Amino acid sequence: MRLSKITTTFLAIVTLSLSTGAAVASEGAALKHEHFSFEGVFGTYDKAAAQRGFQIYQESCSNCHAMKLVAIRSLGEAGGPFYEEEHPNANDNPVIKAIAAMFTVTDGPDAEGDMFERPAKPFDHFPSPFANEQAARASNGGALPPDFSSLLAAREHGPQYIYSLLTSYEDEAPEGIELRDGMNYNPVFTGGQIGMPPPLFDDLVEYSDGTPATVEQMAHDVVTFMAWASDPKMEERKRMGWMVMIYLFIFALLMYGSYKAVWRDVEH
């Protein structure tokens, strides 16, 4: 009987974990329900989608959105979109070296106390497109573009929300809604009026793998990359979680077996 209760409890925990992603995605009628490979307890990042999403970030989003919490080399670490088994040390990964070479970072002070610029290295974090917050606001109509590495985590139902937002821009506002100067209509955004113009349009980029660059595909890819940027260690954490669950289950069985062996000759 007790073994049955232990087993039932374990299965209930697993079932609850598996259903969490679906429950979250089902909330909010305004949101579209796009499937992402990283959702659920068995979810993993789609590396090809994350690579394409990084291309979108580089060619479109990085002009406004910083990604200060992400080190360049993390793209090539285990679980990263450009991880290669033959280069377990991301600093040796030629793709990561090439990405780092695209940037210049401010370093220092030097021996004279002056700051200086140098080519970025894999250990550097992605540099911000603006020198400071004031410059960022001045270039975006007073609004501060959120950091790309925390944008998804900052929103409830983050993946579904960002995907829905990116794919729901409308050319004109419905009758009865007057857009303020510089605003765009997007029904997913609170109030319907958003300062950010549509960041995606068909064929915005040319994917090297031949994938059609539709708005929906690009939105899916950039959300996948954004999810990785906000939680690079997700896959490792999930593997560890399952190892712990399996360990606890086996431990429970051993404890139950020990209990039965010790008390088998004792009348209850």
Image: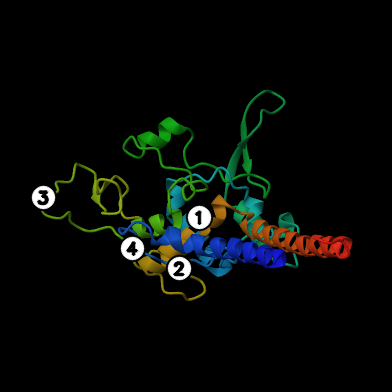
Badge 4 is on which residue? 201
Q: Are there few (<14), some (14-19), or many (20+) residues within 10 Å of tag 2? A: few
Quadrant hosting residue 38: bottom right
Q: Could you say where residue 10 lies in the image, as x and y percent from the top left?
A: 65, 63
Disc 3 or 2, which lies upstream in sequence? 2
Q: Are marks 4 and 3 in contact (CB under 8 Å)?
A: no
**Front residue of 160 and 16:** 16
Instruction: Classify the position of the C terminus by image quarter.
Output: bottom right
The circle drawn on residue 226 is: 1
Q: Are marks 1 and 2 in contact (CB under 8 Å)?
A: no
Element assignment for label 3: loop
Q: Residue at x 49, y 44 (%)?
A: 66
- The relative height of residue 74 versus residue 215 in the rendered view (above or below) is above
**Front residue of 62 and 147:** 147
Tell which residue pokes out farthest to the left in this image.
Answer: 176
- Marks 4 and 2, how far apart at CA: 21 Å
- The relative height of residue 267 versus residue 130 in the rendered view (above or below) is below
- Marks 3 and 2, how far apart at CA: 34 Å
Disc 3 or 1, which lies upstream in sequence? 3
Q: Nearer the viewer, mark 1 or mark 4?
A: 1
Q: Nearer the viewer, mark 4 or mark 2?
A: 2
Badge 3 is on which residue? 176
**Disc 4 marks which amino acid?**
Phe
Q: Nearer the viewer, mark 3 or mark 1?
A: 3
- Marks 1 and 2, how far apart at CA: 15 Å
Q: Are there few (<14), some (14-19), or many (20+) residues within 10 Å of tag 4? A: some
Disc 1 or 2, which lies upstream in sequence? 2
**Disc 1 marks which amino acid?**
Met
Badge 2 is on which residue? 35
Q: Residue at x 10, y 50 (%)?
A: 176
Q: Residue at x 83, y 60 (%)?
A: 259
Q: Are there few (<14), some (14-19), or many (20+) residues within 10 Å of tag 1? A: many
